[in-house]
Amino acid sequence: MSALWAPITGRREEIGTISSPLHAVAKPAARLARFSFLLVLIGIFGIGMAGLLMLNTTLQGQAFQSRTLNRQASELAYAQADLENQLDALAAPQELARRASALGMRPNPYPAFLELPNGKVMASPRQCRATRCPRSLSKRPPKSRLSGPPNVLVSRQGQRQSQPS
Amino acid sequence: MHTARPLRSQQQHDRTTVPPRPRARQSPPVRQVRPVQRRPPLRLPLASAHRRLHTLLIIVAMALSLCAGRLLQLQGFDSSSYSVDALTRTLPLLPARGQITDRNGLVLASTQPAVAVTADPKLTALQASAIADVLAVHLGMSVEELMPLLTRTGTRFVYIKKKVPALTYSALAADLSSRRLHGIFRESDPIRTYPNGSVGASVVGFVGADGEGLAGLERTFNAQLAGVEGKETYESAPNGSRIPLGRSSITPARNGLSYQLTLDSEVQWAAERRLAEQVARTHADSGFAIVLDIKTGQVIALANAPTYDSSRPQAANSADRGNRAISAPYEPGSVEKVLTSAALIDSGTATPNTRVVIPSRIASGGNTIKDFFSHGVLHYTMRGVIADSSNIGTVLLTRQLNKQTLHDYLVSFGLGHTTSIELPGESAGIMPKADMPDGQRDRVAFGQAIAVTGIQQAAAVAGIVNGGIYNPPTVIKTATDGEGREVAVPRTPPRRVISDKSSAQVRELMQAVIDSTNGQRNLKLDRYTSGGKTGTAQRADISCGCYRGYVTSFVGFAPLDDPQILTYVVISNPRAGDTGSITAAPAYRDIMNMALPRYSVAPDAKPHKPLPTQW
C-alpha cells in the first residue's frame, strides 16, 4: 500500500511538475443537503399558497359581508319607506281635521293679525261658537266613524252617494 | 507480502455483492463467483440516466396531451356555453318614480317599495300545504286560494300576489327560510301611494297597474316622473350565481323628476268638502271650484265634485275620473259680463257711469231677450246693469262696440284657446269668429252662445282685476331631479290685456255687485272688501239638443284695491236653487274666509258709500 504513495524514482522532474500544483483548497460553502433543500422549497411553496389562500378567503369573506350589509341596508330602507308612508297618510288634511274635530276643535276663520316687525295687532279675533260662527266647513262629528272614507262626494260605480257631515 | 484485495469488477457493483471470502492459507487466493441459487431480482433499468429522462418526458407528454384535449373541447366544441356573453348577466336597475308634493311639502304622490310574490310550482308542490300556511299569515290570503297556485302543473312560474310591500315580503322570506321551505321568489312591483287620498286627486291623477300615468299630472309628466333605467352587468357561474369578485359594471338608474305643485292641501280639502256639500244640497250633477293666486296665476286649489280617490280610481264612475274644470266647456252666463265690461271700458265705449235706458225686453236675431227679473223701463248706469245683472242693458252697451274689437278682446283674455296649464285633456272652448251674426254677438255679451272652460274663465277674470296683467294659470311651482337639483319649468310670460285704469273701473263694477241688496245679504265677506259677479246660464243639453237646466256660478276676489285671491265656483244643473247667489256663493264665502287669513291677507272691511246704480 505504501508503494502507492512512494515517489516513483527516475522521474523526479516530472513528478515535481505534477506534484507541485497540489495544495489544500479552501472549504467550499456549505450547501444544503438534498433533502433539506427539498424541504425548504416545499416550505416556501406552502407558505406562498397559504398566504394566497388567506388573501382570497379574506376577500371573499368581505364580499359576503358586504352582501349581508347591503341586504341589511335594503331592509332598513324598506322600513323607512313604510314609516314615511304612514307619516304622510297621517299628515293628510282630512286626517288632521278628523282628529282635531274629535278633540272638539273647530276651524275659526276670524284670527287676529300680527304685523311684523312693529308688533301691531290688526283685527280682533272672534271666538267661534257653534251658533254664531258661520258654517265655514262641514265638520265631522266628534265621535267619528274613524277609518271611514273621507267626507267628500266620491261617486260609486253607477250611483251617486253623498255622505252627511 | 503484498496481498492486494481483489478489485470489484463493474458488473458486481451493487448491494448483492458477494462478501469477500476469508483467505485460505493453504492455497493461493482464487477469484471465484459462487452462483446464487435463487430467482433473479426485478431490475428497473433506472440506473441509466437516459431512461429516467425518457420516462419522465413520456409522463409529462401524456399530461400535456390531456390538457390540449380539454382545451380543444372547451374552446372548440363548447365555446358558446362558456363565452363571455353567456356568463355575463345584465340586470336592469329600475329608477324610482318622482314624488309629487304640494306647495308646503305635503306628499301627494310617492312610491312605496313593493314586490310581486311569485312561486315555482315545481319546487313548491312538494311542501305546498306548509308553504300555504306561512303565506296565508303574511299575505292575508286563504289557504284555499293558495293551494291551486302552488300545485299548478305545466308551468314553472305563477304569481301569488302583486303589490306586496317590501317589508311584508322580508318578513315572509325570513319565515320561509327559517322553516327551510323553498320555491317562493319575488320581482319588483312598486306601489304608487297617494297619502292625501281624494284631496287633489283630479289634479294629481293616478297610475295604472304597470306604473304608467293615466290621468292628471301623473299622465302629463309620465316620462319625466318615470326616470331612466340603469344597467348592471356582472359575471356569473353557469348555475346563475354571482361571482363576488368577478368583473362588474354599473350604470346607475336616473330617478325621475319630483314636482312641487302650487296646490295648498288644506285649501284644496276645504274647497272639496264645501263644494261637495253644495252639490249635494242643490241636487246638482256636478260642480267645480278654482282658487287662484291673482298676482302669480298659481292655482291654490282646483276642486271637482264628484271626484275619485287616486289610490282606488276604479271605484269611481269613468265620467268622474277626469277634471271638469279643465275639460268640460259650458256657457258661462253672467260672469261673462265682467269680460264684456272690461272690453267696453278699455275700448273707451263706456264707463261705469254711462247711462242706459233698459226696456222690458229686446229683439235680437229673430228672438227676444229678457232679464231674469221682470221689469218695466229702467234707468240704470252701467254700474247698475252689472250690479243687477241685466242682460238687456249689457246687450245695449255691447251693440256700441265693434264686433271685431269685442272678439279680439275676448281672445286676448284667453277664450277660444287652451291656457297651457300643465294638465291633460284641456279643452279650448268654443269661441265664435269675429264675423259672428249680430244675434250671437248679443248673446255672447251676457255669456250664452259661447263655450268656455272653468280655468279659462277664472284666469280671464283674474287677469282683468289684476291691474290688467294676465298671468297664465299654472299648477307647477318647482321641479327637482333625482339628485335634488332644481330643473327649469317652461313658463309662459304674463301679458297685459287692459290698462290699469280700466282694471280699477271693472273692480268698481264688481264692488257694486256686492253693494247691492242681494250682495249684502248673500255675497259679502264679513271682514274684507271684495268684488264679485253671480252667473246663471242656461245649460246646453246634448241629449235633446236644447237648453235644459242651468249652470250657476259665482266669481269673487278680495281685497278690492289690491286683489290677492280669486275664487270661482260653478254648479252644473242644480235642481234646488237656480241662482249663483244661492247655489255657488255659500261655498265661495267659506273658501275665501278660510284662504284669505291663511295667506296673511289682513282684513280691510270699511264702511263706504256705494256709488249710484240708477239715474
Image (cartoon, rainbow, N blue to C red):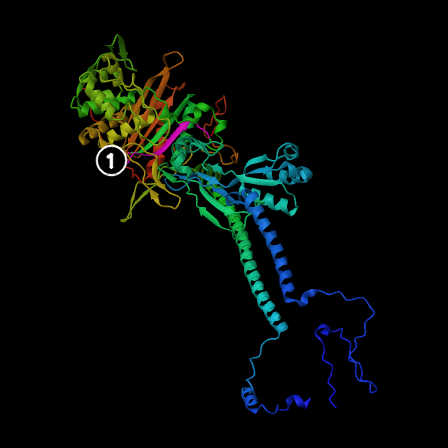
How would you rate the neighbour count of disc 1 (Cα within 10 Å): few for under 14, some for 14-19, many for 20 or more?
Answer: some
Q: Amino acid at mark 1?
A: Asp
- Give the residue at the far front of this rendering: A10
Query: What residue is pinned by disc 1?
Result: B562
**Quarter holding the N terminus of chain A?**
bottom right
Residue B417 in percent (x, y) is at 29, 24
B227 in relation to B379, above or below: below
Q: Nearer the viewer, residue B419 or B459?
A: B419
The image quarter containing residue B98 is top left
| Residue at 49% over, 40% down | B112
Residue B72 visible here? yes
User: x and y percent of residue B441 in the render?
Assistant: 24, 15
The answer to whether residue A25 is left or right of residue B539 is right
How many dots with numbers? 1
Q: Is residue B303 magenta?
A: yes
- Residue B166, image x and y in percent? 54, 42
Q: Is residue B584 visible?
A: no
Observer-nearest of A72 and A127: A72
Task: Check the image and report above or below for B389 versus B292.
Answer: above
In this rendered view, identify the residue nearer to me: B509 or A57: A57
Specify the subunit that label 1 lies on.
Answer: B
* Residue lying at 66% horizontally and 34% vertically, measured from the top left: B151
Asked if residue B247 lies in the magenta stretch, the reply is: no
Instruction: Please say if B281 is above or below B564.
Output: above
Hey, which quadrant is residue B119 in on the image? top right
Residue at the far top in the pictured view: B366
Residue B578 horizontal side relative to residue B61, left or right: left
Secondary element under disc 1, as helix, strand or loop, is loop
For the view shown, which residue lies furthest in the left direction? B348
Residue A81 percent coordinates (x, y): 49, 44
The part of the chain drawn in magenta is B294-308
